[in-house]
Image (spheres, grey):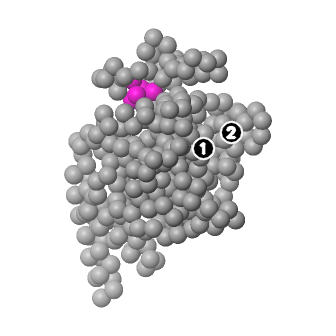
């Protein structure tokens, strides 16, 4: 009887997976995106800092970009809207500035930086998407079991594009001094297969920064603050400061050489939810 039930579940899972594939093929909005299924996940950490905590949170499913928005993708946005290109008139920005409406040579597949929160939001609206909430970002990065890093709980140097632990903070030991092409470190993929959520470029989130973020319910993005949340760290951040729970607050107008972003689509896929649920049941029985 048990064998029959497991066989039936497998057949149903295959049928559901086929339907998911058919539903998603040819759908431009979800091209290059990964579905994060509905369900509970671990949010936050048990740090000594009293502003933090560790709670179990339920979140509806959503789609998230597989990787950070690249220079090449941002160029399409600029060409279609005549939006201003990334440029900061400071010496430190020379390596990253776009000149004559063109991104730095050889950087097409690198994450776009020198991006303010307003720039990122404008791109997301143009693409029919939005910036992720902090909970969405953390679930996509940590999976359902509360990983410390996107790939797991252990420090793994050279698994992502990170900086050093002290001045000058740059590090070449991972192969890149600054940004790296999207997807360069496949071993850094999250539980769901989302790439580059640890390192490369800090990623803007939708909401305002709140020190007691565990206590803040979804919707804090509508409550005015001073800073916007950024997650994930960058090529300029030491690996020990790039856990999935780590965060920083940045003025939304600021364009930094380490600031990029990715987008989400807030649409639940019930077929995928069912497939993930069946998968979890089958794994539990092993």
**Residue at the image position 68 percent from the left and 62 percent from the top:** 49
- The x, y position of residue 88, in whole percent, is 55, 21
**Residue at the image position 69 percent from the left and 44 percent from the top:** 238
Circle 1 crowding by C-alpha within 10 Å: few under 14, some 14–19, many from 20: many
Q: Is 211 a magenta residue?
A: no
Residue bearing mark 1: 233
159 lies left or right of 99: right
Distance (Cα) linking label 2 and label 1: 9 Å
**Residue situated in front as seen by the camera: 252 or 72:** 252
Find numbered disc 2 in the image and state the secondary structure of the residue it sits on. Answer: loop
> Is residue 277 shown above or below 109?
below
Residue 283 sits in which quadrant?
A: bottom left
Q: Main secondary structure of the magenta part?
A: helix
Residue at far bottom of view: 1
- The x, y position of residue 212, in whole percent, is 57, 60
- What is the tally of numbered marks visible in this picture? 2
> Counting residues from the N terminus, which is met first, the one under dot 2 or under dot 1?
2
Q: Is residue 178 visible?
A: yes
Residue bearing mark 2: 163
Task: Tell me where the magenta segment starts and ends, as one range.
Answer: 71-75
Residue 160 sits in which quadrant?
A: top right
Badge nearest the viewer, 2 or 1: 1
**Residue situated in front as seen by the camera: 67 or 50:** 50
Q: Quadrant of the N terminus?
A: bottom left
């Amino acid at each position: 009887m048990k064998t029959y039930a497991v066989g039936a579940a497998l057949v149903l899972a295959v049928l559901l997976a086929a339907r998911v594939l058919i539903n998603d093929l040819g759908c431009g909005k979800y091209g290059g995106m990964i579905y994060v299924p509905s369900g509970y996940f671990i949010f936050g950490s048990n740090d000594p800092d009293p502003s933090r905590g560790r709670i179990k949170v339920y979140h509806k499913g959503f789609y998230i970009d597989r990787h950070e928005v690249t220079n090449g993708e941002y160029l399409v946005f600029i060409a279609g809207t005549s939006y201003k290109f990334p440029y900061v008139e400071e010496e430190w920005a020379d390596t990253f500035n776009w000149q004559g409406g063109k991104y730095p040579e050889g950087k097409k597949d690198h994450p776009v930086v020198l991006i303010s929160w307003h720039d990122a939001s404008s791109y997301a609206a143009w693409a029919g998407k939005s910036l992720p909430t902090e909970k969405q970002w953390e679930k996509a990065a940590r999976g359902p079991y509360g990983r410390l890093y996107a790939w797991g709980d252990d420090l793994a140097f050279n698994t992502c594009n990170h900086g050093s632990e002290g001045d000058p903070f740059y590090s070449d030991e991972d192969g890149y001094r600054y940004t790296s092409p999207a997807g360069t470190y496949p071993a850094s993929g999250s539980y769901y297969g989302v790439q580059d959520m640890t390192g490369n470029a800090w990623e803007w989130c939708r909401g305002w920064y709140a020190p007691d973020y565990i206590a803040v319910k979804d919707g804090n993005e509508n409550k005015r603050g001073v800073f916007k949340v950024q997650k994930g760290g960058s090529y300029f951040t030491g690996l020990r400061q790039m856990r999935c729970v780590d965060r920083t607050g940045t003025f939304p107008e600021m364009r930094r050489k380490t600031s990029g972003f990715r987008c989400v689509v807030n649409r639940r896929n019930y077929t995928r939810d069912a497939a993930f649920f069946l998968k979890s049941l089958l794994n539990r029985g092993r």
